[in-house]
Structures are given as C-alpha cells and as structure tokens.
Image (cartoon, coloured by chain):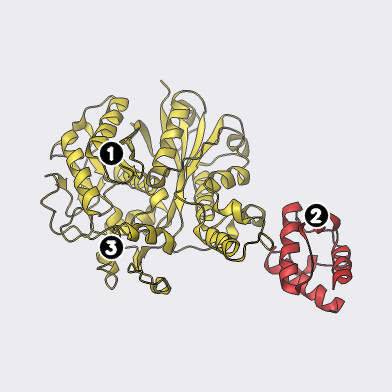
Amino acid sequence: MRRVVITGVGVLSPLGNDMQELQEGLESSRSGVVHVESWSEYKDFKTRVCGLVNWDDYKVIPRKSRRSMGRVAIMAAKTMQDAVKDAGLSEEQISNPRTGISFGSTMGSDEALFDSIGTIAKEKTFIGQNSMSFLKFMSHTVAANIAAMFKIHGRNIPACSACTSSSMAIGIGYESIKYGMSDMMFVGGSEEAHAYNAGIFEIMAATSTRYNDTPDQTPRPFDTERDGLVTAEGAGTLVLEEYEAAKARGAKIYGEIIGYATSCDGEHITTPSSAGMEQVMRLALDDANITPDKVGYINAHATSTPKGDIAESHATYAVFGDKTPISSTKGYMGHILGGCGVVESIIGLISLKTGLLPANKNLVKVDETCAPLDYLLEHRYGNHDIVMNNNFAFGGINTSLIFKKIEE
Amino acid sequence: MTEELVRATLKEVLIEEFEVEEDEIVTGANFFEDLDMDSLDAIDLIVMMDKKLNIDLKAEDAQKIRTIDEFVALIMTRA
C-alpha cells in the first residue's frame, strides 16, 4: 500500500500565521479569542467573543484570482501559497492530472452572502448584483477558487461538512494517494469570522456568553465552568505526497498519515453520539493497524459545549482508557469550524516535531461527568511518535486522523 | 453629465475596484488587451458605473465595449 506523507504546511490561525507562531502561541498559553463589540448591532445577541486571525494582506493574492473570493477563500489561498512554497514545488508538480485538491468550509463567505442575498430579498431584484457574489459564497468556493488560481488539473473534491470539512479533506487526500488515484494532494479548509456563525450556535444555546469581558478565559473544554463554544476563523493547507516520491526528491517530511476514518452516527442532526465517536476512533486505529496504546497524544474536538465534551470524553475513555494525554486546543483560539480539522492536525505535527503535549487552556477543574482521562492541565513534553486528531460535525459526521513521525 | 465626470468616475472605479494602475488608463486603452480584464469584469464594471452615475446600463452592454473611449461614448448616449 502506498504511504502518504506531509511535505508542506501553511496556516493562518488566531494563535499565529505560521507553524512557528502557532507553536509559540501554544507554548506561551496565549489566547487568540477577543471581544467583538461590533456584534452589539444585532438585537438580543449575547455572544461577544470570537477567535480572529490577524492578517488582511489580501493583495498577495492576484486580483484576477481574488475577485471571486471572500475572506474564507482568500485566507485558504494564502495558506496554499505558503504550503506550496514550503514544499518547494514546481509548476509542473502542481499542474498535472496526478495532483489534486480537497478543501472545505462550513459556509462560503458570510459577508458576501449577507451583502448579496440581503439586498435581493429586500428589494426583490437581481439588478445591481456583482457577478462575483455567488462565487464568493457558494459552498465550494474555497476548492473552486484554489483550483483556478493554482491551475489544478487533477481531482478536486470539495469537502463541505461543517466542523469536519478540513479533517475530511485531509482524509480524502490521504485516500486519493494511498489508493493510487493521485500522487500529490493539496488539502485543508477555512472559515471566516462573522456574527452569523456565532448567531446560529447562540440560537441553539451553544455559545459562550459569560466571558465577554474576559475573552481569554473562554472557551473552556472539559471544565466545570464551560458555557459553550466560541466561533473562530482560520485556514490551513497541507501538501500530501506519496512517500517514495517525496523521499526521492529530498522533500522535508513533517510526518506520515497512517490512519483515517470517517463514519456517521445516523441518529440526531445535532446531538453528539458517544458511540459514533468511539466507532470512528476504532476505525482509524484499524486503518493504521495499531493498538490504542501506541497513540501518544490525542487532540480532541471538544468545543466546550456541555453535551459534546462529555460524549467525547466517554468515547475516548472506551477506546483508550485513562492513560493517553489529551487536550482540546480550542481553548486557545476557539472553534474554527470548517478550518479546525486542518489547524488541529498541524498542532499534531508540531507535537510530533517538538514533543509538546499542549495543555487544555482554561481547564481548571474537570467536569465530573466527563470520563476520567489524562487531561493535560499544563504543558508536558513527551517522546511520542503517534498522534490522533478527532473532529465531529452536525449531521453526526465524524473523522479521526492518525499521524506518525517519520523515521529518519 | 459631462464627459469629464464620466472619465473621472471610470478612472476611479478602474483604480479602486479593478486595481488598474493609473498610468495604464489612457485614451484608447483596451479593457481586455491592455488592462487585464475579462468578460466578467466587464459586467461588474457596468454594474458599478450604473450605480455611480445612476444611468441605464445593462449587463448586455458589456458585450458592446472594448475600449475606454467606446465605453465613455456609450455612457454619454445614455446620460
């Protein structure tokens, strides 16, 4: 079976805009969550916290490519640029039928959606609409725009499954190479910040509202005082390559993807299922052909909602017991929704490289209804060579990815 | 509406919305060959100029324009 390795990384996150900044942000326990006063314009809307990316240098993306992108796609394109540069690829390696992409986001550009649909609905006319609006807010805007900008000729499989969008994209890329459909895949995802993203979760009573004046203290995955998730923005790209080809060209290798699974609860549209979460972790371990004790760190999805964190903790305990270090890194930056899977996978790669086992930021007292796991209460440094990243989405869609340090 | 106003407005839109360099906006400049624009840009240029000048431009007008001078002349017939 063909092996799949990661040879390039690009990231924009509330905690930093490259791997080094992200690592430093984790190690210094910084928060990327801020108070957003402008959201007060929405009536009876309580949430005022969001994880924001400090980057708006849009002109690094050429105008012809950027004109059909909202912030969600622009950020993704920037991380793609960085990942391609990091991997040291030629145009011929990028543009050929054996190189493909998979990218996703929960939404297209919220800003473009509001600007366009809001006016059409109110004025009942399409006259005056910009031809680019739809291309900015359509569901596969990230994948479509990146494909056009980078002249992608291989498969383009958009992965738009809300909070598993970018983890699923990584899985699609992994399977494409593993099973011989592609030799190289660019994969990842993105999300842009907007009141709408927070608003839809507030309607479901799932957002954090008690820490508006102390934004660095929320979200609080697994903590007794958690009060919901905090939406965030960000993007990331991984360059995936077939191992022998990467080795032959002398590529820098961040790690190997040794396991991936996606499966579905097939139950409730929003309520998390512990059984479904357990199933996907077991399937990923099977795919990697390893036993649970080989995993040295788990990056949990845990968004800081009451139900989700409990369900995930019990699923994890059922598979791993209480000895595997676990943290949710959403406490540092919030929930990047469609982009969380790739950003948290990049944190997994940082963990493999440095040994860092990042603490659960804002976890002071573990909720007693959560299972007894080895919750990281402070940073540790391990000697592990395998990490797992789990993500779960509305619709009962679950993903689990397993990364391994490559032997020199 | 004067031709000067139309040219000034067009120049402003081309610079701000289409990121055209000011020194490229010269008499006779072709939108597609000289200013790196295409048919979608032409439609959006029509929409933006229509809003700025409040004239009766339609998306199908985009097929009639190739140069700055042709576009200014078209607008003057509607003004």
Q: Secondary structure at mark 3?
A: loop
Is residue A300 placed above or below A264 in the rendered structure?
below
Give the class, few, some or many, for how many residues have Cα within 10 Å of label 2's Cα (few <14, many ≥20). Answer: some
Q: Nearer the viewer, mark 3 or mark 2?
A: 3
Question: To which residue does mark 2 refer?
Answer: B32
Query: What amino acid does circle 2 point to?
Result: Phe
Pick the quarter of the image with the C terminus of chain A: top left
Residue indicated by mark 3: A208
| Camera-nearest residue between A333 and A141 | A141
Instruction: Report x, y in % for residue B2.
Output: 86, 79
Label 1 lies in what chain?
A
* Residue A75 point in image, percent of width and height: 50, 55
Residue at the image point whose x is 44% and y is 49% from the top: A106
Location of the N terminus of chain A by quadrant is: top left
Q: Which residue bears the numbered disc 1?
A: A387
Relative to A145, A374 lies left or right: left
Residue B65 position (above or below residue A321): below
Q: Residue at x 78, y 71 (%)?
A: B55
Type of residue at label 3? Ser
Is disc 3 surrounded by few (<14), some (14 to 19) or many (20+) residues within 10 Å? many
- Residue in front for this viewpoint, A260 or A123: A123
Which of the chains is yellow? Answer: A
Is A5 drawn above or below residue A306 in the view shown? above
| SS type, badge 1 | strand
A372 relative position to A127: left or right: left
